[in-house]
Amino acid sequence: RRRPSAVSPVRGWTGRSGTTPISATTDPQGLYGPHSGSRLFSLPVDTFAGSMDQEIDVSSYATPIDASNSTIVASAYLHGGGTSDYSQLYVQALDSGHVSLNVYYTAVERGASYVLYTITQALPANTRYIRIGMIFQREAGSSCNAVTDDFALSISDDAAVDFPPRAFQ
């Protein structure tokens, strides 16, 4: 039983692999809605896997980052659809040439309700960009039932200079 949800392309996000996720009002099966607000992220109906991310320039915070004083906190609500399908949050630290310095992943979420996942990590020296992203994977059935919602990102240093928290839509 599939019910098409109101879907739209996701602005400001870059598809990285597989099918680019969409912004929708329900999961692909029409069984549950967003954690909060009116939209969530999911894969389109009848797709296998996909990922996308947003890149943030943090070069203006180079001094505390290079002194190993900066910590990033990224969070999102993940929902596995109660199947073997899953969603996952990741953060990637990149240098000025966009070369990966490190990637941090949450555990995968396969459960039937939203669970808050958080990545708290010291940023490696020379980080100039951060990517925050999501991964979706179908393990059974015809559609990936996993979804994500309510992304947030902040960066701080020991001098208590905070990068403004950013909410993602």
Image: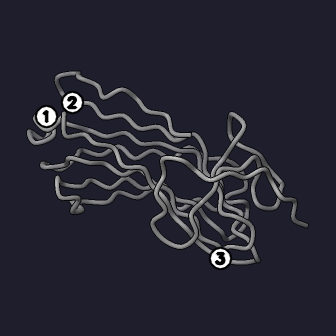
Earlier in the chain: of badge 1 and badge 3, it is 1
Please name the residue shown 64% across and 75% down the image: 48
Q: Is mark 3 on a helix, strand or loop?
A: loop
Tag 3: residue type?
A: Glu
Figure quadrant of residue 29: bottom right
Quadrant in the picture for the N terminus: bottom right
Residue tagged 3 = 139
Q: In this view, does 42 lie to the left or right of 90?
A: right
Alpha-carbon span between mark 1 and mark 2 = 6 Å
Please name the residue shown 49% across and 59% down the image: 52
Residue tagged 1 = 64
Q: Are marks 1 and 2 in contact (CB under 8 Å)?
A: yes
Earlier in the chain: of badge 1 and badge 2, it is 1
Q: Is residue 37 left or right of residue 131?
A: right
Say which of 160 and 29 sits in front: 29
**Above or below for 39 versus 94:** above
Tag 1: residue type?
A: Pro
Q: Is mark 2 on a helix, strand or loop?
A: strand
Say which of 21 and 150 sits in front: 21
Q: Is residue 107 visible?
A: no
